[in-house]
Image: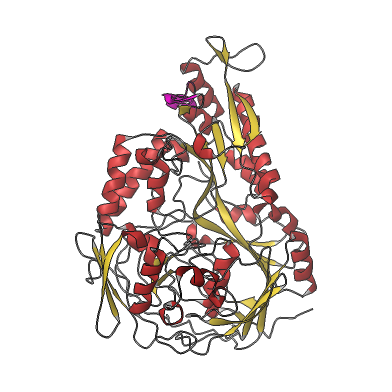
Amino acid sequence: MRRPSLATRVLPLAFALMLILAGCRSVPMTPAPSPSPTSFPPQATPSFAPIPATPSPTEEAPAHGGTLVIGVLAEPDTLNFSLAREPVSYWVLACLDARLVRVRDDNTLEPQILAEVPTVENGGVSPDGRTYTLRFRAGLTWSDGEPLDARDFLFTWQLLNDPNYPANSRAGWDLIQSIELSSDYLTATVHLERPSASFLDDTIVGIGERPNGFLLPAHALADLTPQEIAEADYGGVGHISSGPFVVEDWQPGQQLTLERNPRFHASEVYLDRIVFRFLPDTQELLSQLTSGELDLVAGLPEWSLAELQAHPELLTLVTPRGGAVAMLVVNVRDPAALSQPHPILSDLRVRQALLLGFDRDRLVDELLLGAVPVANGLLDYTPWQARAAPQASAEFDPERARRLLDDAGWQPGPNGIRMRAGEPLQLTLAVETNPERDFAFKRQIAASFAQDMRALGIDIRIVPLTRSAREQRYDLLLCWCDRRLTPSGLSALFSSEAIPGSDELASENVTGYRSELIDQLLARQEATTDAAARAEILRRIQYQIDLDLPVLPIYVHVDIVTGRNHVKGLTPGPMNGIWWNPENWWISSQEALP
């Protein structure tokens, strides 16, 4: 059995560790409609700013004013969302810019720039999935006072699809065939080349460290060439905002200061300023936090959980990252001859034995203090999560794993390593070396797996990944996979069309997994606009992948934020961490500040 309650596993820790439970339950795909907020896929249209609960007499009401100083390990590479690649860039952008639609902490959708979430029911999505009608809020402005409307959507599409513009992603935008604007510029009718249910997920809805949902200001950039836009000050102190804050000052290598945007359309923005301070050392971040120089530290690596035990005075929030799953990628093709099946791993019984014999609970307890969830599937803690198949959710069972290896013809050898036809049961496990700061921790994960496999009679040789994963010159690959996954990502990972070949090394199906059923289901989910029907197709896809085991899920990555107790209003969720509502953050004047 999987551990029944993750919260009970973190209570014994010496520091105030809170596992955010919003993602700790299965998220229903089609719950009963409620007036606000909407489910994801949406069933109703929520209001933009839900009315906050009235504080009880013993609760402190949110206060206006103050500066929140956040320590981060890296500096933004740019504040132009269409060029940004550093996660910290998107954390800053979440404070600077609104999104067309955002995901709240409970995985429901909330329109920001749009007046409503487009659905089939409200006419926002055509039944054939080829036309999206986007209705913009009236009266919105950019921080310089210029109107924010459908013209910005049109411009963003035109720029991102310009071959001369170095966009970080064109996902979804490249499906658009044409856009029609209403005379008041408050409606954009978007025609796609083909039906796409994922257009909402990948283009309209803002999710994590992705460019989804942001727009570029047409009035400020339209007269520039693509190259001039890429180099423009819009990516720096000249950024024009649509969200609760604007750029006040940027001192390269030191800090970035934001101040409240007086033109932001939400009724309340509590903080006067947010300062992002760049300190590329975890120990220095924690030192400045405990000394009071910082109020909050964001983006800590998972291996820092052990260090946080030494700071019981801090409040640490640990939130599952929806769809970000550390996993072992199984190469079902022969690394020496990719046209042939793998001589060992093409046997499902061996793949099942690898999973059943891997004590993932022990790994999580020993390396991560039991503070992260063991993974069941690749869409864990997302709005598209489905119940896992028996293999993925099965408990650690080394005896069953040994029986499976026996059945597959692998018999115990004299040195403890199983043999078949004179060949040892030996596999290479490649470990990515980037980012360098995480490499030692990845090696620990790999060593824990190798230890469990040795007990089964499997010899695991851990090697650094020195070539592109798309070349598939490994048996197993430890995939960090810390980027949040959406349903379209399943096609990239498991479609047979995405298997790397000599002419298409950019493909991402580095398992070599091929399933006619999965190919059919992936195509169907993309073309299905009915929320309930699409949810069922996605359930079947996840179930079949869990049965076939082209990947072995290990654990769900987490966002780690730690801070002092005077920082209030943080309500992290699986799809955006703390970054979905910076306008609601505030500083308590009643909490003691040493």
Is residue 237 in view? Answer: yes
- Residue 369 image position (x, y, % from top left): 67, 50
Relative image position of residue 549 (x, y in whole percent): 44, 35
Q: Which residues are magenta?
A: 337-350
Expressed as whole percent of the image width and height from the top left, the position of residue 272 reads: 61, 86
Q: How many marks?
A: 0
Q: Nearer the viewer, residue 464 or 63?
A: 464
Q: Give above or below for 534 relative to 164.
A: above
In screen coordinates, is 419 left or right of 12?
left
- Which quadrant holds residue 479? top right
Task: Left or right? Give the position of 405 relative to 250.
Answer: left
Does residue 523 appear to the left or right of 461 in the view shown? left
Where's the C terminus, which quadrant?
bottom right
Residue at the location (71% across, 61% down)?
A: 15
For the point 53% across and 39% down, the residue is: 469
Is 331 drawn above or below residue 236 in the view shown?
A: above
